Amino acid sequence: MTTDDCIIIGGGPAGLTAAIYLARYHLRVRLFDSGSSRAAMIPRTRNHAGYPDGIAGKDLLALMLEQAEKYGVERQAVRVERLRHDDEGFALATEDGDYRARSVLLATGVVNHRPRHLLPEVHDPALERGLLRYCPVCDGYEVTDKKVGVIGTGDHGVREALFLRSFTRDVTLIAPEAEHALDPACAAKLDEAGIARVNGPCGNYAIEQNGQGEQLAFDTARGRMAFDSVYPALGSRIRSHLAVEAGARATDEGCLEVDDHQRTSIPGLFAAGDVVKGLDQISHAMGEAGVAATTIRNMLGDQRPLWR
């Protein structure tokens, strides 16, 4: 069985950036991509420098993959089912066979929790049209002076509503299921910012027309409500289970713990992007990937010469 210099798990911005770096270091790189990068959900990112008119997430990923493949990166559209560390490096089991690598970079990201009862036939068109959004850091600018609903409660929901309040004064925090779970301090912050709060449950979602355009509407305890954009603030699932099962340390939330060079607690195992605690942004993930890739190259060079 051939041993790769590095296997990258995850084909989002972090994984693809690392693949480009490692391939240009003349290393043997394999990329496993199950096709579920959160970046592919972005209708158009306008925070990414170099694209004055923005770029669709799928288009950005396609360009990055084209660049990686130009340097010989082999991408395989399979899911990694198991990761194991031993004295010889790493053993990986996938749905189409087993592989070995001297090092591994995990760039598997996170999955946003979606509102219950929001069916795909409404969710996906709403996301594409900007009626549904998941990242106020990415696109808060686009809801400037719009009517915005935030589905959430507790500290997380309050933080997201307050963040969005700097873009528009018309923000409503809606409990996803029943009554809000807000302590007095959170309630006071909402009142001070002029953020309305409405109890749930939320259901019967639909894209509706009004005199000024489309809105995302749904039922609440206050009745039918409609918003120019809706942000679910329901948390996310960090896809770190492969590394955790292999013995890597993670936070209580599941974010992998890494040092300043993206090294996990397992020698030779690195992590970059949203699977690591930090700012969930494309630019941040790409920076971490560049650091990880260069550290991997130097580590492998210390193990044996990389002379050509």
Image: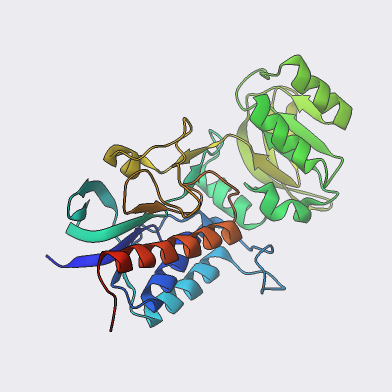
- Whether residue 12 can be seen here: no
User: Where residue 36 appears, x then y in whole percent?
Assistant: 42, 54
253 or 44, nearer to the observer: 253
Q: Image check: 14 left or right of 208?
A: left
In this view of the protein, which residue sits in the foreground, 7 or 187?
7
Q: Using the rendered view, name the quadrant where residue 300 is placed.
A: bottom left
In this rendering, position of residue 287 left or right of residue 242: right
Above or below for 23 versus 104? below
- Image check: 259 left or right of 199? left
Q: Is residue 107 above or below residue 164?
A: below
Q: Residue 301 location, x and y as percent?
A: 32, 69
Q: Nearer the viewer, residue 42 or 215?
A: 42
The residue located at (47%, 40%) in the rendering is 255
Q: In which quarter of the image is residue 65?
A: bottom left
- Residue furthest to the top in view is 184
The residue that appears at 37% across and 43% down in the rendered structure is: 265
Pick whichever, 186 or 296, lies toward us: 296
Quarter the N terminus occupies: bottom left
Residue positioned 86% across, 49% down in the render: 145
